[in-house]
Amino acid sequence: MLFICVPYLGSTMQGLLQTVRFWTTKRPQGLNSARPETGLRNTTVAEVLSTKGQDKAGSWLWCRTDDTVYDAVKQIAQNNVGSLVVLKPGEQHHIAGILTERDYLRKVIMQDRSSIYTKVGEIMTNKDKLVTVTSDTSILHAMQLMTENQIRHAPVIDGKIIGMISIVDVVKAVVEQQHEELKRLNEFIRG
């Protein structure tokens, strides 16, 4: 069995990002040269969404700007997610922003506001401050954006909202890719 250690630097995500960069730039010569190039640079957000079952339109969770924060946070808890896409009233696929657990904690709880009387539009992260990706964004680039901006959720927008990707989705893709790479390395070593 082959073990390769990459030094840990900084936070967990930065260490993971450094490991991914190592594997995508320092691949041993001759390894699977007959196979088409795979890896995180070529794995797209669309592929990750399809494994989540989000390749169908409207499969992401949402609320509206005029909903109460109470109802939105209740939906977050019931669905065991960390955020909701926020739509304008009457709109189906045009995003107004995102509501995250962090928005709720900082803008409602820490300010002693009532979640029953506060509207989502008052506390959400507005569209102009959102970090988004497209379906053809590579997972490596999505991970870099999420790490640099210290966010855990990014809406996927191809002209209109088509899904949501989380840091958990990205980490799962990285782990799966590394597992496959280790299998290929073991096969290469065994000849």
Image (cartoon, rainbow, N blue to C red):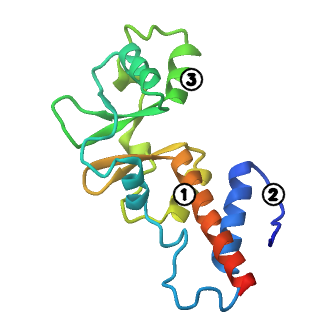
Q: Is residue 80 above or below residue 165?
A: above
Circle 2 crowding by C-alpha within 10 Å: few under 14, some 14–19, many from 20: few
For marks 3 and 2 on the same chain, the one whose residue lies earlier in the sequence: 2
Identify the amino acid type marked 2: Leu
Where residue 4 sits, quadrant-wise, is: bottom right
Q: Is label 2 or label 1 in front?
A: 1
Query: Mark 2 touching mark 1, by CB under 8 A?
Result: no
Marker disc for residue 106: 3
Q: Secondary structure at mark 3?
A: helix
For marks 2 and 1 on the same chain, the one whose residue lies earlier in the sequence: 2
Circle 1 crowding by C-alpha within 10 Å: few under 14, some 14–19, many from 20: many
Query: Mark 1 touching mark 3, by CB under 8 A?
Result: no
Identify which residue is drawn at 34% across, 34% down: 61
Identify the amino acid type marked 3: Arg
Identify which residue is drawn at 15% across, 31% down: 90
Circle 3 crowding by C-alpha within 10 Å: few under 14, some 14–19, many from 20: few
- The foreground one among 142 and 110 is 142
Identify which residue is drawn at 40% across, 13% down: 70
Marker disc for residue 173: 1
For marks 1 and 3 on the same chain, the one whose residue lies earlier in the sequence: 3
Identify the amino acid type marked 1: Ala
Marker disc for residue 9: 2
- The foreground one among 185 and 145 is 185
Q: Position of residue 191 (x, y in %)?
A: 71, 87
**Gap between marks 2 and 1 measured at Cα:** 21 Å
Residue furthest front in the image: 190
**Gap between marks 1 and 3 measured at Cα:** 30 Å
Q: Is label 3 or label 2 in front?
A: 2
Q: Is label 1 or label 3 in front?
A: 1
